Image: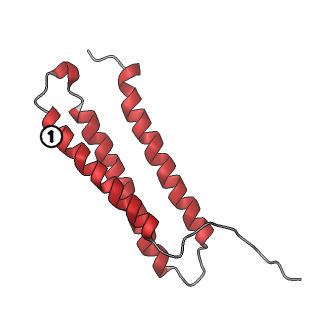
Amino acid sequence: ETIVEVSYYCKSESNAWFWFVFTWQGLLLASGSALAFQLRSAPKIVNDSNKLAFMLYSSFMFLILRLALLVFSRSLSDGSVTQSTLGEISSIFWSIDSIVNICIYFNKFFLKDG
């Protein structure tokens, strides 16, 4: 008896989309960093530079994780990990990144300072 596993995934032949998204998010992180730097001298009532910096830091960490996933996926070409599994891991990274950023941003609406 032979068991055949079939997995379907959507993938481009080139990594252009990954590099486009990686570059775009890098530009957004750089712009956000400049904004956080400029906001640090704003009055405390409108100063969200600490939260913005924390959001940028967490997004940068997930960006690095996705880059590491791409690099290691090339070294795992022996078939031990399927492309659909790598896609699932990448999707989980995107989801956790979004959830963390939402929690950081909306945290100020639920918690009162002072």
**Residue 92 in the image: above or below residue 98:** below
Left or right, residue 14 beside residue 109: right
Instruction: Name the residue located 37 percent from the left edge and 60 percent from the top edge.
Output: 22
The three-letter code of the residue at mark 1 reads: Phe
Q: Is residue 58 above or below residue 112?
A: below
Q: Quadrant of the C terminus?
A: top left
Residue 65 seen in the current view: no
Instruction: Determine the residue located farthest toward the left in the rendered image.
Output: 41
x and y, in percent, of residue 15 in the image: 45, 72
Query: Mark 1 falls on what kind of element?
Result: helix
Q: Residue 10: in sight, yes or no?
A: yes
Residue 49 quadrant: top left
Where's residue 100, x and y in %?
A: 43, 41
Q: Residue at x 54, y 71 (%)?
A: 12
- Horizontal placement of 19 versus 87: left or right? left
Q: Residue at x 21, y 45 (%)?
A: 33
Q: Is residue 79 above or below residue 109?
A: below
Give the color scheme: rainbow, by chain, secondary structure or one colour: secondary structure
Residue at point 44%, 65% (across, down): 18
The image quarter in which residue 9 lies: bottom right
* Frontmost residue, 12 versus 81: 12
Relative to 1, is 98 on the left or the right? left
The N terminus, quarter of image? bottom right
Q: Residue 38 at what x, y percent from top left?
A: 13, 37
Q: How many marks are shown on the rendered structure?
A: 1
Q: Nearer the viewer, residue 42 or 85?
A: 42
- Against 4, is 51 above or below? above
Q: Label 1, on which residue?
A: 37
Mark 1, Cα crowd under 10 Å, few <14 / some 14-19 / many 20+, is: some
